[in-house]
Image: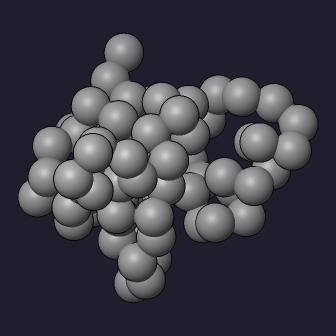
């Protein structure tokens, strides 16, 4: 299983499935990270957290703990 945390800088992937439950899952979905959405990893902070993504034509910073809950393909 490949998660959003495993996607390298400059690569794109499509969200396949969301894990987590309750408020965490809702927060991820509210940010526009839903099944079938394409995400592009723009850069990673110097210490590795957070990850900066382009999703639905806007930039989003996401903690690696949250990125681990998002299964992707591609």
Classify the position of the C terminus by image quarter. Answer: top left
- Colour mapping: one colour
The residue at the point 64 percent across, 66 percent down is 31
Q: Quadrant of residue 44?
A: bottom left
Which residue extends farthest left? 10
- Give the residue at the far top of this rendering: 1
Q: Is any part of residue 11 visible from this angle?
A: no
| x, y percent for residue 12 | 21, 54
**Relative horizontal placement of residue 51, taking residue 18 as reference (left or right):** left
User: Front-most of 51 and 18?
Assistant: 51
From this view, report whether residue 53 is shown above or below residue 9: below
Residue 70 falls left or right of residue 46: right
Q: Position of residue 25 (x, y in %)?
A: 75, 42
Instruction: Classify the position of the N terminus by image quarter.
Output: top left
Q: Residue furthest right?
A: 22
Residue 26 x, y percent position in the rendering: 80, 50
Which of the 4 image quarters holds residue 72?
top left
Q: Residue at x 21, y 53 (%)?
A: 46
Q: Is residue 9 left or right of residue 16?
A: left
The front one of 46 and 74 is: 46
Residue placed at 73% from the left, 64% from the top? Answer: 30
Can residue 6 be seen at all in this image of the molecule?
yes
Question: Residue 16, image x and y in percent?
Answer: 47, 37
**Looking at this view, is 15 or 54 the one in front?**
54
- Identify the residue shown where x is 35% and y is 64%: 53
């Amino acid at each position: 299983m490949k998660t959003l945390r495993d996607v390298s800088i400059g690569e794109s992937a499509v969200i396949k499935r969301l894990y987590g439950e309750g408020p965490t899952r809702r927060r991820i979905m509210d940010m526009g990270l839903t099944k079938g959405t394409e995400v592009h990893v723009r850069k990673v902070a110097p210490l590795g957290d957070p990850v900066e993504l382009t999703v639905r034509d806007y930039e989003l910073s996401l903690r690696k703990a949250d990125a681990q809950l998002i299964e992707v393909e591609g």
